[in-house]
Image (cartoon, helix red, strand yellow):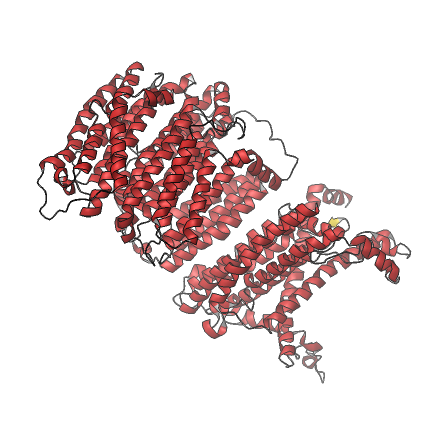
Amino acid sequence: MDQFISFALQPEVFLVWTSLAKTLALLGIILGFVSYTVYAERKVCAFIQDRVGPNRVGIPLTLLGMKKDLPFLGLGQPIADALKLLLKENFIPASVNKFYYYIAPKLTMIPPILVLAVLPFGSSLFGVPMVIANINIGVLYVFAVSSLGVYGIVLAGWSSNSKYPFLGGIRSTSQMISYELALGLSVIPVFLLCGTLNLSEIVLWQRENGWMVAPGWFKGLTIDQVLHPEAWVAAFQAGFSWQRFWIWIPMLISFVVFFIAMFAETNRLPFDLPEAEQELVGGYHTEYSGMGFALFFLGEYAAMIAGSGVIVTLFFGGWTLPFVPDGSSPSFFHLAFVPGWLASLIWGLVNIGVFFGKVSVLLFVFIWVRWTLPRFRYDQLMKLGWYFFFELALVNIFITALVLAYVK
Amino acid sequence: MTAFLLSPEFRVVFLGIFLLMLDSFTKTDKRYIAWAGIVGLVILFGFSFFPGLPEGVFPPGFYLSDPTALFFKRFMLLSTILTLALALDYSKVYQEYIPAGRPGAGLGEFYILPIFACAGFMWLVSAADFIMIFVSLELVTMCFYVLVASMRKNLLSLEAGVKYLILGALSTGFLVYGITWVIGLTGHTSLDGIREVLPIVPQGYQVALMFGLGLILVAVGFKVAAVPFQFWVPDVYQGAPTPVTAYLSVASKAAGFVVLMRVIEPFLTVPGLEQKIVTVLTVLAALTLLYGNLAALPQTNFKRLLAYSSIAHAGYLLVGVASVGAEASGPAVGFYLGGYLLMTFLAFLVLVHVGRVTGGDDISDFNGLGRRSPVLALGLLIAMLSLAGLPFTIGFLGKFLIFEAAMQSHQYLLVVLGAVTVACGFYYYLKVVRAMYWQPVVAEAPAIPVPVFTRFLIALLSAAIIIFGIYPQPLLAMLR
Amino acid sequence: MPLVLFWIFAILMLAFGLGVVFLRNPVSSALSLVMSFVALAALFITLDAFFIGVIQILVYAGAVMVLFLFIIMLLDLRGEETRRLNLAAWTGGGLVVAGFVGLLFKVVSTQPGFDFPKPPISRPEISDVALVGWTLFYKFNLPFQIIGVLLLVATIGVVLLSKKELK
């Protein structure tokens, strides 16, 4: 046993099994997240349209002979959905190109999951940093991997050998390529500011200097002081500076461009032209059924979650929480009776929770936008991308450079 | 930094950008853009006679400003000026073949792209680093890809564009692969660094070094149209707009030879490699001489004839390059190229005007030109005689210097082959002369009006061909 | 371990490279090229050149090849699959390739460099992104600016060659 433990604690071996554990845990969380985002989508949609939404599927107590089911707000709905999709017939039309038809849904599902590998989703647990691969080019990796996502959609459209899917595939290719430019260019100001491409370091930078989307920062304000208003003012004065304020302007532009481009990249309304129901039936996945369709569906939501994760990491301070001096330090508990290791464990879990909480809020915004805004026309979409966002992102780089030259 | 930006190449680039702006923000006749370009380049040509940049402006090992580089910079400026002059006269024909939404559309780019190519050429002849060579070569090639294919409603032009693109990309592949081998073996990208390292490179590396150099030679062979890498030449020359053909055959070839001589120079210092390189060059030169001259014999299209003649001239130039060890080989090649510029542009200038009126570029279109337009006929006569190598023309003197260098380095075989093929050349060049003076005029063929500026250029080029043919010292002084 | 990875990715890259040439369906050829690029990127990453590897994927696999695929799909090159092979062209091409590979083999086999151990490449202090930037903007500044001119020319060329009606 001791031998085993010492083997497991060798640096390389330790790295391998902790990475594996993190990967499995994150995958589990994300898949759960995906199914419950679908549920949230239906619930929020129902709320916005003044309906009830799914509210039946809960714990089926009647099967056990009881009088009533326990609906739990319909929280069991995703399980029922998944079962339905798994059991449905996987119908393959006659004239499709079988190989690509089969492989396309997998290709849309893989990239968003690969993106998760570099997102720091927490500070650390037991001294293990909560990021699967802490590489120094994190953001570029995100773009590189997510740029591969378009192949699944394009191949689905082409291999279906049918006109609506083909149109959907073509639309999505041109849309994703157009908005990828704005997406990539809009984060360059962030790198200019932080001087690093490493996502963990960007998060740490934001813990020190404030979130990218915040004009000032309550530096040094801790939860202990929250009850004292004069501490607020002091902390605000300590954290605020005009430099920070000037930098805030290009960062805000960056954020807006990035956020909107992310809608286009994930094919969400108001940019969901590739699957515009009224024009293209279902777009690129018209000819799919059963699990193939489900993978597209899940791929879209996984991309949404990964995208939200990237936005949170880049602009909303990642796993950090405002008013907390240092997430991993036990300062909050220093009066209490809890031992240090427990405090750091709790903090680690809190940070993970904070990250996913922020992601959930963003997901809600994604859904909210979908059910409130109308869809763009195709030429409007292209014009907006090329004439406005591309230029804005480009100009913003110069603005940032100027501001930084002025400030530094 | 300002000195950096005021280097001759950047001035040319700024001229190009300025003209682009002029082109986008004005809607009048586009021909004045060509005029502005010509004037600008003439001014820059004048600047080149004043002391240039102070040393050390560019990082060492990248950029050379030796007499050869300076000579070829002037060469490139001059050929760009002449190309623009040709383009002016060619505008009418060009416009017929572009899908223009309104008159004059697309012409601006046709005048401006050669200016950017000129900047690339000037960087190329100053390049002393493989990265520089590659980058500026790509800049030039990119301009030519566009220019060759730009007459989009002409199928020949499109065909030429596609052929040039595919073979250009292929040769770029060879170039990059060869460069990779050389850099990998020597650890240097700059030719200076390579020259220093080569003596201590182990003997066993030489096969690999020769392999890398061979790949580079293949790529350069494509650019200078050496046999067996010449097969793109006739089609591309025929299909491209005539000014572009002239530019391609003069400037591109000259740049290729400058690069060739610069690249092989460090390798010639290694005893084991020298003999191999000379053998390769000799074989290339002999093949090019034979193929270019023999294949030109049956041609009936004037542009194709000039294409094969361009291959043949590449052969003579390769003889000069292969005359390793002869002191005069470098200046001989430079002088030959200078003469080649004058006579080729003269021939193309006449062709543009004849083609504009007759609508074709076959040799039969030149029938009776002696009576229809004595000025053009005289100009073409001088060009053809000089291309053939008649004494008292610059073409003769160029060949003479090349053969002299070859004799010095004991390349007797090449000298004999050269002499035989010169005789061959007389036949096909004089075929054009025969058409002009001894063939009857086609009844309905109109007289050809020649603008004043063109008359001036024809007179200038003809005079230069004859004057430098008798009194070559100023040119040679520039090269030494 | 890196050696194993090298062989895996090198073989993958070459296999997909052959696929580009030999597959009859243009879409399959294009996708083989994508896979070949991805394997190449993996090779870069085994050499610790993360930045170049990722840029390889981002630019070539993620952008250039998507456009390629786009064009291939729009052209609908179905005839390509049924086209008869030109025997003479294949023999000629095969001979050239065989000659080239033979030459390469000869060069590599006479290479003494593989026999002795080389000193390890010193690890630079700064990250590879900064190193690439440093090399581009300081050491190779002049070629970098020439590339700028090249891109300008390419842009003009694209407009000139592809616009339906020039204005």
What count of labels does the image hold?
0
Q: Nearer the viewer, residue A201 or B289?
A: B289
Q: Position of residue A36 (x, y in %)?
A: 65, 69
Looking at this rendering, what residue extends furthest in the front direction? Answer: B452
Left or right, A388 with reference to A1: left
Q: Position of residue A107 (x, y in %)?
A: 52, 58
- Against A267, residue B6 (above or below) is above
- Against A28, residue B458 (above or below) is above
Q: Nearer the viewer, residue A182 or B367?
A: B367
The quarter of the rendered structure image containing the C terminus of chain C is: bottom left
Q: Is residue A191 visible?
A: no
Q: Position of residue B105 (x, y in %)?
A: 35, 54
The quarter of the rendered structure image containing the N terminus of chain C is: top right
Left or right, B291 with reference to B269: left
- Against B374, residue A117 (above or below) is below
- Against B426, residue C166 (above or below) is below
Q: Position of residue A209 (x, y in %)?
A: 74, 51
Left or right, A352 with reference to B268: right
Left or right, A142 with reference to B375: right
Q: Nearer the viewer, residue B306 or C129?
A: B306
Looking at this rendering, what residue extends furthest in the bottom direction? Answer: A67
Q: Is residue A279 visible?
A: yes
Q: Quadrant of residue C52?
A: top right
